[in-house]
Image (cartoon, grey):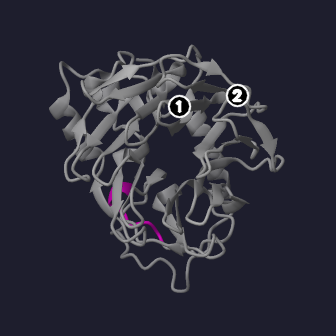
Amino acid sequence: MKSSRHSASIATIGLLLCCAVFRHGVAAPTPEGGDTRPPAPAGAYRPLADTPAAPSAFEVRTPLLAVAAAGSRIVAVGLRGHIVYSDDGGRTRVQAKVPVETDLVSVCFPTPTVGWAVGHGGIVLATADGGKSWTKRFSGRELDELTDRHSQGKPDESEQSIPSLLDVWFESPMKGTIVGTFGTVFRTEDGGKTWSSQMDRVDNPEKLHFYAVKGDADFLYIAGEKGNVWRFDRESKRWVSLPTGYSGTLFGLVVDGPKVVAFGMRGSAFLSENGGKSWTAVATQRAAGITAGLRLANGDIVLADQSGGLVRSRDGGRTFTSFGGDTHIPVFGLTQVEGGRVFSVGVLGVTAQMSH
């Protein structure tokens, strides 16, 4: 396998580097008293997966990579294991208790209290109190064991590297899926008590990276490299390949049963209204990579891109129009909370975008 695929794609690296500029360019202040964690012995190495996230005063401009609604609460995740939550529309934020310092890139709440977050180093975190505190369910070491237990034949060179987990989605409190680099797919059907590898159940011989997993009670999709989408066949319990005909990377999905919008590089978006059997290219009016998408409670679809631009569709993804103007500040995640308000996250933290 090519050396360029021994890490997340160039696009993902670009997003993280963009955040890193903010992280390293301006030092984040710590609360009075500073970092209260016990110091490691001189010269000792403390793995990020075993290091609690450092306390931070969380200024308004704190880079965050993903966001989800836990009822009316906003919960966002980001670099170095930082998770914050807000109960007042992002005006004030509280840092959650997190057991890792690994970068976190996705978060999902199937209920207002139960949530999941994933990130680099094969990290999977869970919360049962609406995002206030988190526990580590497993990390790269356990992930490797799960993969080895379900793999067939001798693993290739890429499988010797711990994958980055790039998205998590629970279609119900009990059923959830995690995806990541090198075709990593894990699924649970008992609320996260046990996880099984699905890598031998995916039509993905090239071990393409998976960037997104989204769905509902009836349909579940994965999006990844080379314009590919996969749909979970619940009868055969296999992931069926549904190529869009696009050669670039797809970063995300917006799902409404058999209707699905897949979006990615250079403003690309594709619509299927028959469960992925056929696709139509959609004009988004955007040139930058589309990094986030959301289906609103009223059925509208909102997409956001790396330049901070927003577009909305009122006809199920067939056409999109711009609104709000470009901020030139990358948007990495979108969510809608109870009451209809829509929020985005990015290099400047949490931003209110619109009210439904």
Residue type at numbered disc 1: Lys
- Kindly identify the residue that appears in the image at 58 percent across and 55 percent down: 335
Rendered view: 315 above or below 309: above
- Picture coordinates of residue 96 (x, y %)? 45, 71
- Kindly identify the residue that appears in the image at 41 percent across and 71 percent down: 97
Rendered view: 342 above or below 339: above
Q: Does the CB distance between marks 2 and 1 fall below 8 Å?
A: no
Q: Which residue is mark 2?
A: 266
Q: Secondary structure at mark 1?
A: strand
Q: Which residue is mark 1?
A: 259
Residue type at numbered disc 2: Arg
Is residue 151 found left or right of 318 in the rendered image? Answer: left
Q: How many marks?
A: 2
User: On the image, which quarter does residue 159 sit in?
Assistant: top left
Rendered view: 298 above or below 2: below
- Picture coordinates of residue 197 (x, y %)? 24, 35
* Residue 278 visible to the viewer: yes
